[in-house]
Image (cartoon, rainbow, N blue to C red):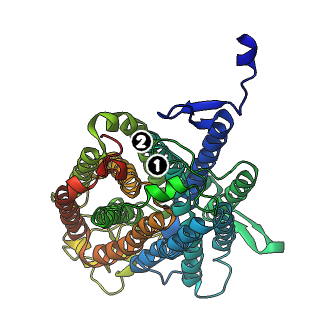
């Protein structure tokens, strides 16, 4: 018997189905499938880094290259990334349904690499620099449209019992990217705003451009790994290999499993919930740097450095949450965790509402020539004392709410960050997991493309919304409206709660 056992290699059957003499997959297939899934984890991580590595420095970089840009335009710069991703996600998802996924992955990452390099050159033109930044960020977003391909592949390459854990892992790697991105950006502040200039190629490497160049390098590494390791795999809810949907040799069993319709109400509801989740998080990302500069009179460098540390800490918290929800969801289910995550996010934004009688410092530089210094409403910014050439800090006088809105205390800001860092990852991974289970054995490329597009639309509208509301009405209206939006999402989830069940559970193939 020992000799027989020794003959078992990676081609030997590893997992068995409930049917006699039927093997689900061999050890070789199992190993290849999971290595391919791990490459998708890394792809998600690198895509996340490509976005987050510049997010805390976009505002000061924009101010530096084009002083005509204001916080309203900042919303459009940040939204352009999501707009590009919104357009690309369904296209790449459709592509991945009919062709090997390696093709859309390679094309999208190549676009991301080129766009990251373009971002490093937006300071070179003599004028209209802010518009070049919009184009660069839109192309980075277009290249990040592969998120739909990544999630559809992992959803199709895992059984129902594996999927929550796999989706949590994807989200954990995404969060890890958000950790290291701001952390890298904080470290790059040591280079300074001047940095080093390579005249031969007209490239200035400083605290703003170095992160995007690192993102381009990581994209090249990603391309190499996809070539070397990634392979196509697809299994049904039981873990049985059914062949890739991309090929004509797909087995008839997968066709039979797809005869029942997907619950479209559950699909649409999941997209709505995901839109709201990404919408409020996009607002949180966008507002952090200008809010802290206005409330605490931080300089550009301080805002990038401190927010980089804060976002990195939130990322660490999120990774812990992702690892924890994989265990908790087995006992409670995904729906109750999604509900709890939304409530936690609501509490986080409610705490951010301004209160008290302490008001922000005002930037005198913008109004000192037109306003009397003895105004009872104005508090001089420390940046204007002594050296008038110093960088102006504080709340700009052009934002009228600065004169009558109390500050958001630092303790409020930190507490809110902690709660949002707890609630958002729970909402994100549970929404993705429920969505993939609702679709079931259907080809998920286009479905995941639409979900990613919904998230991208949220990331497009969120920054524009918050920039306009924050600039003209201030933090009280901004966070009050967000609380109302989150509350409406809680009501919506309760309404469709019973419909958000797995495809196989709905049609009685698997007991929940």
Extreme residue toward the front, this view: 20
Q: Position of residue 12 (x, y in %)?
A: 68, 30
Occupied quadrant, residue 441: bottom left
Residue 55 appears in the picture as rendered: no
Q: Position of residue 417 (x, y in %)?
A: 33, 50
**Helix, strand, or loop for circle 1?**
helix
Extreme residue toward the right, this view: 200
**For the residues marked 2 and 1, what is the alpha-carbon distance in whole angstroms?**
7 Å
Occupied quadrant, residue 395: bottom left
Find residue 171 and name its label.
1
Left or right: 121 in relation to 70: right
Contact, mark 2 vs mark 1 (Cβ under 8 Å) = yes
Q: Relative to 345, does residue 90 appear above or below in the rendering?
A: below
Across the whole image, how many numbered discs are drawn on residues?
Answer: 2
Q: Residues within 10 Å of mark 2 (few under 14, many from 20)?
A: many
Find residue 322 and name its label.
2
Q: Nearer the viewer, residue 438 or 355?
A: 438
Left or right: 263 in relation to 109: left
Quadrant in which the C terminus appears: top left
Q: Nearer the viewer, residue 210 or 301?
A: 210
Q: Nearer the viewer, residue 58 or 126?
A: 58
Q: Relative to 289, does residue 236 appear above or below in the rendering?
A: above
Residue drawn at (46%, 49%) of the image: 171
**Helix, strand, or loop for circle 2?**
helix
């Amino acid at each position: 018997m020992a000799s027989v056992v020794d003959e078992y290699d990676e081609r030997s059957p590893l997992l068995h189905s409930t049917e006699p003499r039927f093997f689900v997959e061999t050890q070789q297939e199992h190993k290849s499938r999971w290595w391919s899934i791990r490459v998708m984890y890394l792809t998600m991580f690198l895509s996340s880094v490509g976005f987050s590595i510049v997010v805390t420095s976009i505002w000061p970089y924009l101010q530096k290259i084009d002083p005509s840009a204001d916080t309203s335009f900042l919303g459009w710069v940040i939204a352009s990334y999501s707009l590009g991703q919104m357009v690309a996600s369904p296209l790449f998802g459709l592509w991945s349904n009919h062709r090997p996924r390696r093709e859309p992955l390679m094309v999208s990452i190549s676009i991301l690499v080129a766009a990251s390099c373009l971002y490093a050159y937006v300071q070179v033109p003599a004028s209209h620099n802010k518009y070049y930044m919009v184009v660069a960020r839109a192309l980075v977003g277009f290249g990040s449209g592969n998120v739909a391909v990544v999630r559809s592949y992992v959803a199709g390459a895992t059984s129902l019992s594996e999927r929550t854990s796999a989706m949590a892992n994807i989200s954990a790697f995404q969060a890890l990217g958000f950790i290291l991105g701001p952390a890298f950006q904080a470290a790059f502040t040591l280079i300074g705003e001047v940095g080093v200039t390579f005249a031969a190629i007209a490239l200035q490497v400083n605290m703003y451009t170095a992160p995007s160049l690192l993102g381009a390098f990581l994209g090249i590494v990603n391309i190499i790994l996809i070539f070397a390791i990634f392979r196509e795999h697809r299994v049904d809810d039981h873990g049985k290999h059914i062949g890739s949907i991309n090929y004509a040799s797909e087995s008839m069993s997968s066709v039979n499993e797809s005869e029942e319709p997907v619950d479209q109400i559950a699909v649409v509801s999941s997209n709505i919930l995901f839109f709201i989740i990404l919408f409020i998080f996009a607002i949180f990302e966008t507002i952090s740097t200008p809010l802290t500069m206005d409330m605490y009179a931080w300089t550009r460098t301080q805002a990038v450095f401190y927010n980089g540390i804060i976002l990195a800490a939130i990322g660490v918290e999120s990774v812990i949450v992702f690892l924890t929800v994989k265990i908790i969801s087995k006992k409670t289910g995904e729906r109750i965790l999604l509900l709890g995550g939304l409530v936690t996010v609501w509490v986080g934004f409610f705490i951010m509402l301004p209160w008290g009688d302490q008001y922000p410092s005002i930037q005198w530089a913008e109004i000192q020539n037109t306003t009397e210094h003895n105004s009872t409403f104005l508090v001089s910014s420390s940046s204007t004392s002594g050296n008038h050439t110093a960088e102006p800090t504080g709340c700009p006088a052009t934002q009228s709410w600065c004169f009558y809105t109390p500050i958001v205390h630092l303790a409020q800001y930190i507490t809110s960050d902690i709660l949002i860092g707890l609630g958002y990852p729970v909402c994100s991974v549970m929404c993705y997991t429920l969505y993939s289970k609702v679709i079931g054995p259907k080809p998920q490329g286009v479905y995941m493309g639409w979900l990613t597009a919904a998230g991208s639309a949220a990331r497009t509208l969120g920054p524009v919304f918050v920039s306009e509301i924050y600039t003209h009405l201030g933090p009280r209206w901004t966070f009050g409206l967000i609380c109302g939006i989150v509350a409406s999402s809680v009501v919506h989830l309760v309404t469709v709660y019973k419909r958000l069940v797995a495809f196989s559970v709905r049609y009685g193939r698997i007991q929940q």
